[in-house]
Amino acid sequence: MPTLAQLDRKYVWHPFTQMRDWLRREPIVIAAGRGAVLIDTKGREYLDANSSIWTNLHGHRQPAIDAALKRQLGKIAHSSALGLASGPASLLAAQLIRLASPSPRQKPRRVFFSDDGSTAMEAALKMAYEFARRSGQSRKPRFLSLASAYHGDTVGAVSLGHIDRFHRAYRGLLFQTDSVMAPFCYRCPFNRARPERADARLGRKCQWECAGLLERKFSAQKKKGRPYAAFVFEPLIQGAAGMVPQPEGWLQRAADMARGHGALLVADEVMTGFCRTGPMFACQKESVSPDLMALAKGMTGGYLPMAATLASAAVFDAFLGDYAECKTFFHGHSYTANQLGSAAALASLRLLQSSASVRARRELQKVLGDSLQSLWRLPAVGDIRQVGLIAGVELVRNWRTRQPYPWRERVGIRVCEALARRGVLTRPAGNVIVLMPPYCATPAQIRRMVSALAESVEEICGSAL
Ligand SMILES: *Cc1c(COP(=O)(O)O)cnc(C)c1O
């Protein structure tokens, strides 16, 4: 009998993985999970330090979600949303709308369900495209998104993204979108201090040059007579770019500009949604109310693949008409509005809003921030960035000059391999090590993640100052 590891190596093709490297080593085969812990087939325990790629919110085998799924299994697992409604999906849509539009001034929205972050963005993209055409703005609407943006791996989502290495591989397949510099205070090309910092000792005073670039981009396009149909962004923090937070106030400025120039706001909350950054949705921190919002990853608490695109009333209305007008939104997937997924999402939303969970998140955020301070003593640590329960530790060859490690050295990957040997699992974004613990993690578990990271960085990058 072949072992499970042998079967994997013989038959499975892993995502974002150089399979030649994969085949050289024994894979970790996960057999079970409990809270923030993953257990492999040999009985070894690991901390799930990136919440299983940013999806898991309350830990594995969470009793309330398990129970909700069992209850739903006693009724039905799936029925189609093409032509049929279902209880869990209707309840979930109502909840999502309520949570996304806390103020009654904001227009009601609609929920379009799909399967993952990429499909949620793909739906948003098509909605924005058709909306712009129907409102007479342009026959070929153009999109503006941020440099280093990541919005998923389907062709439309990759077109909206601007991570060079992914983009280059498929250039011939993609459609043209424009990009604008994203704020990145640690590597600010204008050498400014952070705008929220009262004293500006670390650089000349920030004049929001990055926001100025954005304004110029919108104006230039308008002058050409082809204003942007939509501005697409990851709110508060760009994930795959390397956990790059936006300075306080940037999002609101950017949103005001986009609105001023008549562009739809498309918020990709796939990573930031469901209290990752603090509020239910990151946009709420800066009182930004997007026209389209994509949700996925944490939506079912990390249990099942399910996603949603929330649309404003105006966007929704653009798709209403007589059958023969063909204004229908011609888009959908087999598992859209899956009943099991909806049941898990409803249970997860209940947990998220419980006062115990709110309190735990607040405490963990502080514990994470405090523990991370211990990493500053390591010379390879160039920057430590944290937004809510998302942390990124950027490793650099020289912290004085901020010189990065060349990507070919695979420093991020090697540090994560060293972490795995210490019983902590995560994945890097380039040379940035990501810590994104599930909300059920204990303070002791968070401290263990950070101390294992310190040891791993010392092992791979050295400790001499
Ligand atoms: C992960 C991610 C996506 C893609 O989601 P998938 O579920 O992997 O398709 C899109 N946008 C952001 C911001 C993400 O982090």
Image (spheres, rainbow, N blue to C red):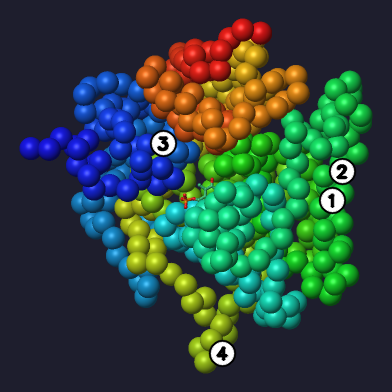
Q: Which tag is nearer the camera, tag 3 or tag 4?
A: 3
Viewer can see residue 417: yes
Percent from the top left, x then y, of residue 438?
45, 30
The structure residue drawn at horizontal position 79% and vertical position 73%, both measured from the top left corner, is 226
The structure residue drawn at horizontal position 57% and vertical position 62%, both measured from the top left corner, is 171
Label 3 vs 4, first from the N-terminus? 3
Residue at numbered disc 4: 325
Percent from the top left, x then y, of residue 372?
59, 17
Q: Which tag is nearer the camera, tag 2 or tag 3?
A: 2
Q: Is residue 127 left or right of residue 191?
A: left
* Badge 2: residue crowd in 10 Å (few <14, some 14–19, many ≥20): some
The structure residue drawn at horizontal position 49% and vertical position 55%, both measured from the top left corner, is 153
Considering the image in quadrants, where does the C terminus appear? Answer: top right
Q: Dot 2 lies on which element?
A: helix
Label 2 vs 3, first from the N-terminus? 3
Residue 105 or residue 169, whichever sits in front: 169
Residue at numbered disc 1: 213
Q: Which mark is residue 52?
A: 3
- Distance, label 4 to label 2, CA atoms, is 46 Å
Residue type at the position of mark 4: Glu
- Distance, label 3 to label 4, CA atoms, is 44 Å
Residue at numbered disc 2: 209
